[in-house]
Image (cartoon, rainbow, N blue to C red):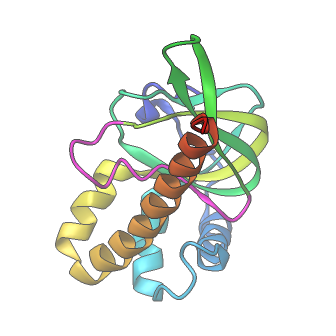
Amino acid sequence: MNTSDPYSITPRPDAGADVKKDLLIALGDHPFLKGLDVDSLRILAANAMPVEIPAGEVIFREGDNANRFYLIHAGEVVLESQDNRERRPEIIETIGGGDVLGWSWMFPPYYWHFDARATKPTKATFFYGTRLREACENDPKLGYALTMRMADVVIRRLQATRKKLIARTPTPKS
């Protein structure tokens, strides 16, 4: 999987009607998309494909162009931030099945705020974020639904980062 250029990822050649139907069902069953109407799910499915990410693979890097996101079905991914003092990554959060990877595709300036790396083999659905931003502009109902869901992801990631910072802050001596 070449994550530096998501457009190099190609769907399986057997992506026929059954595979598309299975994808639509999988999207509707994912906690992030639960409750979306069928028309919205069809738009999402038209901009998605199943992917498998091997353990150890870097999915994206902080500062790179954010043009995609993933629904995680199984596996594990860590979000990391580089600790400039110690020159090692600091794990911000570990996410797994039922979660979302990547919110930066939706909010300007569209660059990643963390690194993401699979720590276990991970099954996910890959979405073309650039295409979905256009779809959201054309379908305000879908745009609102995805924005509200992504805002929740941003808040959770912000809270995870805050907790990490608090844990690292030394307690003042009295």
- Magenta stretch: give its range: 97-111
Is any part of residue 11 visible from this angle?
Answer: no
For the C terminus, the quadrant is: top right
Relative to residue 149, is residue 13 drawn left or right? right
Residue 138 figure quarter: bottom left
Q: Residue at x 46, y 30 (%)?
A: 8
Is any part of residue 65 visible from this angle?
Answer: yes
Q: Residue at x 21, y 42 (%)?
A: 109
Judge by depth and name the residue closer to the eye, 1 or 14.
Answer: 1
Relative to residue 130, is residue 103 drawn left or right? right
Residue 71 figure quarter: bottom right
Judge by depth and name the residue closer to the eye, 21 or 146.
Answer: 146
Residue 75: x percent and y percent?
A: 78, 48
Whether the magenta-drawn stretch holds residue 100 is answered as: yes
Residue 7: x percent and y percent?
A: 41, 35
- Name the dominant secondary structure of the magenta segment: loop
Whether the magenta-drawn stretch holds residue 50 is answered as: no
For the N terminus, the quadrant is: top right
